[in-house]
Amino acid sequence: MPKTIKKVGVLTSGGDSPGMNAAIRSVVRTCAYHNIECIGIYRGYQGMIEGDFKEMGPRSVNNIVNKGGTILKSARSLEFKTSEGRKKAHENLVKAGIDAFVVIGGDGSFTGGLLFNSEYNFPIMGIPGTIDNDIFGTSHTLGYDTALNTVVDCIDKIRDTASSHNRLFFVEVMGRDAGHIALNAGIGAGAEEILIPEEDLGLDRLLESLQKSKASGKSSSIVVIAEGDKIGKNVFELKDYVDANLPEYDVRVSVLGHMQRGGSPSCFDRVLASRLGVKAVESLLEGKSNYMVGLQNDKVTLTPLDQAIKGKTVIDRELLRVSEIMST
């Protein structure tokens, strides 16, 4: 028989992303709707180890749906990677009467939760929260849509000054292992070239493309680069290479950095967070565990956590073709 769930914990782990607060709100209010208790676990798994818990009700999550970051804070816990740390965490959960928990985070957070479940048979559900959109089993992770809008807005502003000074701008965006932000934001902002980890454009082809742009009459250009792109060691080395080989270009670099992870979540992310939070809690109440809730074909679905962790997202080849056509 499935374990009866009377009290659910919720935590945010790993990097923050816009929409996490909306997901916390959804988990808390879904618990209240089903007349079960909800406990906020502060600072991720480290807070679980230290027993940093607080009871949460519907009014405790007022006015957070529009806020970026996470009110529960986030921390990476080296101690949770040890069996002793996980033992402390389990003892605290049992002491607090928590029967299951929802973890909002990325694959590292899911890996920790899955290991914890294997040791203590403790029911867990995952909600994907990362701007990189690099988790298998969902078309959108929390924060991805907001990050795209932030990046496009920044590039629009950079283009104004690029056009005014006839400059070439390299704009680096987040995406250590996945180019989803760079590809989609690059198309949306009208970038002349997009460099992503999944596709090795090569230095010669990049130079050829920039020369072609110059010859076609473009007086300024925007190149969007995912931070994990393999074409150079980093964006500044790339700038130096272009400076040396295409002296006719006045090259500038803009690294957008952590501004992409902040800000008020978009309507899409708020609605997605609300849908995923409801599904996570209700799945636990149905006796399910070790799943990630996600979005596929606009339907909320469940993906086994081990598949979400091991699976690889793939870049949309059609979008690559579109970007090539649009750069003409």
Image (cartoon, grey):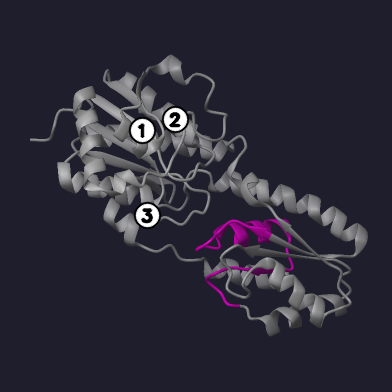
Q: Which mark is residue 223?
A: none
Task: Name the residue that disc number 1 marks.
Answer: 47
Question: Residue 280 at x, y = what percent?
Answer: 32, 37
Mark found first going from the N terminus, 3 or 1: 1
Question: Is 196 one of the magenta-colored residues?
Answer: yes
10 Å crowding of disc 3: few (<14), some (14-19), many (20+): many
Secondary structure at numbered mark 1: helix
**Residue under the point 43% across and 62% down:** 313
Circle 2: residue type: Leu
Is residue 20 a member of the stretch shown in magenta? no
Evaluate whether residue 126 shows in this view.
yes
Residue 174: percent from the left, percent from the top? 59, 56
For mark 3, what is the residue?
A: 137
Q: Quadrant of residue 196?
A: bottom right
Q: CA distance from mark 3 to mark 1?
A: 28 Å
Q: Quadrant of the C terminus?
A: bottom right
Type of amino acid under label 1: Gly
How many numbered marks, from 0 up? 3
Between circles 3 and 1, the one closer to the viewer is 1
> Which residue position is annotated with label 2?
72
Examine the image and state in which quarter residue 53 appears.
top left
